[in-house]
Image: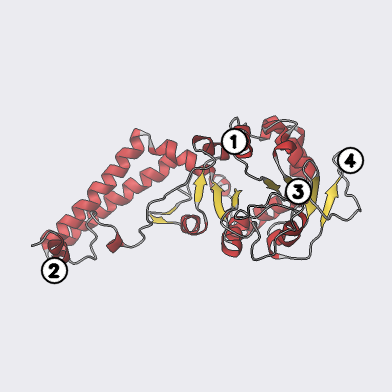
Amino acid sequence: QFFLDRDIPFCPRSAVNDVLGSITNTHISGDFHKLVAQEPEKYFEEKPHLKQVLDGMKAAGKRLIFVSNSPFWYCDAGMNYVVGPDWRDQWDVVITSAGKPAFYTEDNRPFREVDIGTGKLKFRQVLQLEKGRVYTAGCLKELTQCINWSHPLSSSSDQNDIPYDDIYSPLTSPTVMYVGDSLFADLVDAKREFGWTTAAVTPEVGWEIELQRKTEFRIAGKAIEMLLNSLRLYQRQLGTGLRTKEDLEVMDKMERLISSWRDEQTRLLGNSFGSVFRARYQPSLFAHSLRRYCDLYMSNVGSLRHYSPQHRFYPESPKLLSHEIRGSNPECCDIDDDFLDFGY
């Protein structure tokens, strides 16, 4: 848009490569992290309910593991601002510079301890992960060997129980809930490789919920629904024969009206790309992946404060195909079948 507004000739592919290259270099160099860590109040959003959620989980006996790809000094600056200087006390294990997704996929990456005072790495071998300390690198296999948690089905209270083997590890089962904000970078692997319960933090959800409550957006949605139903009824009245030129013109005009209302919805979203959950009016790849790989999704972790740490979610059955959706006049269903349902 920058080039279009200024009438500058450009190659879209080159522009994309330049932008991606700049972002990558900024992250790799560490300049971005340094600027943010110096002024956390300028770059970090306040999360007033995060500490409440963490405290609730700890009170319910949940074991919490903090795993981040960012270096310790950056995590410390952010968590100090969002939660408070005692943020490490709320986690049983703190791992920074984890190197995800290699943290999940590799099995020969030992942990290193981080000196909290200097930020430098210690040389001693890490055989057990201790609360209050900070670690870096590592992998899931090392994690299962360096923690000493009892199995969820075990009644033993002996703190000297040996760590689990891979078959019964509590870190490779649905009893683990992984909360993350990067769907393709780590949530997909967490679900696909380890069968964890996954919760995606997707800020766009909050924005769209607020938008959907606005009168203008609801009017556009109702208009689209009415026009689509009118088209379905119109074709039902026309029957199975060939359409006349006038019939096709009527349908074309109604379809253009639907397109204009969908354009209005995109305009109300405030960006030229539309909803991240939709490709025009069909579910986007992101939406399909969210449904496939995530058990929960929310605008921020603070949303969990509305539920007990022991809450059980019972989602509605996913209905992906038209014949599965009853009561919405699916066009692929046989009308005779509907009559049979009513005993005719």
Which is closer to the viewer, label 2 or label 1? 1
Residue 195 percent across, percent down from the top left: 57, 61
Residue topped by disc 2: 240
Looking at the image, residue 116 sits to the left or right of residue 317; the answer is right
Please provide percent x and percent y for residue 91. Answer: 70, 41
Q: How was the colour assigned to the protein in this rendering? A: secondary structure
Q: Which residue is mark 4?
A: 118
Mark sitting earlier along the chain (4/1): 1
Q: Which mark is residue 96?
A: 3
Q: What residue is drawn where x is 23% and y is 57%?
A: 252
Secondary element at tag 1 = helix
Mark 2–mark 3 distance (CA, rounded to whole Å) = 64 Å
N-terminal of the pair, mark 3 or mark 4, is 3
Label pair 3/1, CB-CB below 8 angstroms: no
Q: Residues within 10 Å of mark 1 (few under 14, many from 20)?
A: some
Residue type at mark 4: give it: Thr
Could you tell which of marks 2 and 3 lies nearer the N-terminus? 3
Identify residue for label 1: 56
> How far is mark 2 from mark 1, CA to CA?
61 Å
Indicate the position of residue 41 as horizontal and vertical percent values. Answer: 69, 30
SS category of the residue bearing label 4: loop
